[in-house]
């Protein structure tokens, strides 16, 4: 972990290679600190600048300076112990967290999602000392997002990751987020699933030769999420199979290009780097693509999303007999939980179709009369 630097310090190098230090808060004036970094004189000048007082070391007794120097060295750069790290704000802690492998090893999609949470946290509580963040504080943040339980869960996951790292780095003694419970999610179908009629309506509105037709073909016949669908292009295809590392789960998927997709790609238009492109032929971000695809759906009279289209693909595969490992290979899932949702639903539908006839009266069945009383008595002897 890099050594923490006191806040508001700026380091510059001169043409001669000398390091000089400045103190500056926001867009305020810069104050030159002439003492050598790490010395008691630097400590005194920094604290004077922080307090808005002129820097001076006059009147400081030699014994005091020696004590300060020993204290600085004895703390072995465990970061601003001489100022008390506990008063540093939550924004400072988040910035340090972003510099560590605990953060950088997350997938790009996870970091992007959690960055959105951190942006809100910094805006509302960035200057609050992180030592004052308690389980009650985090629970209150969860409850403010209670109307959207998934956002509340993302917030809690983000704060748990930050707090766990801070505990390991010894910035805090315990993880306050660990005791906070996840919000209860309402059980339900989630994103509305496309029907075959929805697909037909969309394809009627957007025939071959339109970029909107390319969009639905890539989504429907690859099973990719938006973030991966906007990246896939010719460079990923070898001998008719597209290979791509997924953004969310960081797993490789190998997707043979099916005839309907090849037909749409040949008709185009497609981009040079990605099959999915905008009006200018350039790639799209998953956010902008989501908005454009939603508009295309509305124009076709379909009030559904790209994620719901991924669901119909999984449903088709499961109803055609795809197993859990096969679904995982197609959609980049890990484990069996997600794929089992579709295989179980397909099994229930198939079993219902096979067994519904059992509700009918079997008129050809032979009725066997029960033994009379004397016969039963003979059998019991």
Image: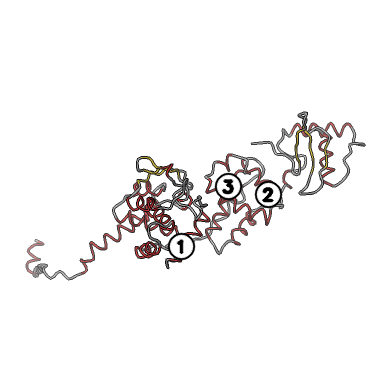
As drawn, 129 above or below 62: below
> Which is more N-terminal, label 3 or label 2?
2
Give the number of the disc on residue 296. 1
Query: CB atoms at circles 2 and 3 under 8 Å apart?
Result: no
SS under mark 2: helix
Work out how far the residue at label 2 is from the one at label 1, CA to CA, in angstroms.
40 Å
> Does residue 70 appear left or right of residue 260 in this picture?
right
Quadrant hosting residue 356: bottom left
Residue 23 image point, x, y percent: 79, 42
Provide the residue designation for mark 2. 91
Viewport quadrant of the N terminus: top right
Please tell me how crowded label 2 is: few (under 14), some (14-19), or many (20+) other residues with Cα within 10 Å: many
Provide the residue designation for mark 3. 161
Q: Looking at the image, which is closer to me, 36 or 273?
A: 273
Query: CB atoms at circles 3 and 1 under 8 Å apart?
Result: no
Q: Looking at the image, which is closer to me, 363 or 8?
A: 8
SS under mark 1: helix
């Amino acid at each position: 972990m890099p050594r923490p630097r006191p806040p508001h310090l700026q380091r510059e190098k001169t043409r001669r290679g000398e390091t000089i230090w400045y103190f500056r808060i926001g867009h305020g004036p810069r104050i030159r600190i002439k003492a050598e970094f790490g010395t008691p004189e630097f400590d005194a000048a920094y604290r004077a600048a922080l307090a808005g007082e002129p820097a001076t070391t006059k009147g400081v007794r030699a014994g005091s300076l020696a004590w300060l120097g020993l204290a600085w060295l004895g703390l072995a750069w465990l970061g601003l112990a001489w100022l008390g790290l506990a008063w540093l704000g939550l924004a400072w802690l988040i910035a340090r967290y972003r510099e560590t492998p605990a953060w950088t090893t997350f997938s790009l999609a996870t970091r992007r999602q959690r960055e959105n949470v951190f942006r809100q946290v910094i805006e509302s509580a960035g200057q609050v000392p992180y030592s004052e963040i308690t389980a009650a504080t985090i629970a209150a943040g969860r409850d403010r997002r209670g109307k959207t339980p998934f956002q509340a869960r993302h917030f809690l996951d983000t704060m748990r990751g930050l707090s766990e790292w801070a505990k390991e780095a010894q910035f805090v003694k315990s993880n306050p987020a660990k005791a906070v419970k996840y919000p209860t999610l309402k059980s339900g179908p989630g994103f509305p699933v496309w029907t075959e009629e929805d697909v037909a309506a969309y394809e009627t509105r957007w025939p071959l030769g339109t970029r909107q037709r390319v969009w639905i073909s890539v989504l429907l016949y690859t099973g990719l999420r938006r973030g991966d669908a906007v990246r896939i292009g010719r460079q990923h295809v070898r001998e008719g199979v597209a290979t791509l590392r997924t953004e969310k789960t960081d797993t490789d998927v190998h997707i043979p290009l099916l005839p309907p997709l090849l037909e749409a790609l040949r008709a185009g238009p497609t981009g040079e780097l990605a099959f999915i492109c905008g009006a200018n032929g350039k790639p799209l971000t998953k956010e902008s693509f989501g908005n454009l695809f939603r508009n295309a759906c509305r124009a076709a009279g379909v009030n559904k999303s790209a994620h719901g289209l991924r669901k119909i693909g999984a449903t088709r595969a499961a109803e055609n007999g795809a197993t859990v490992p096969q679904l995982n290979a197609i959609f980049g899932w890990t484990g069996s939980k997600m794929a089992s949702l579709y295989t179980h639903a397909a099994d229930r539908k198939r079993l219902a179709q096979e067994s519904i006839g059992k509700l009918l009266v079997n008129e050809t069945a032979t009725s066997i009369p029960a033994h009379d009383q004397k016969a039963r008595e003979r059998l019991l002897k």
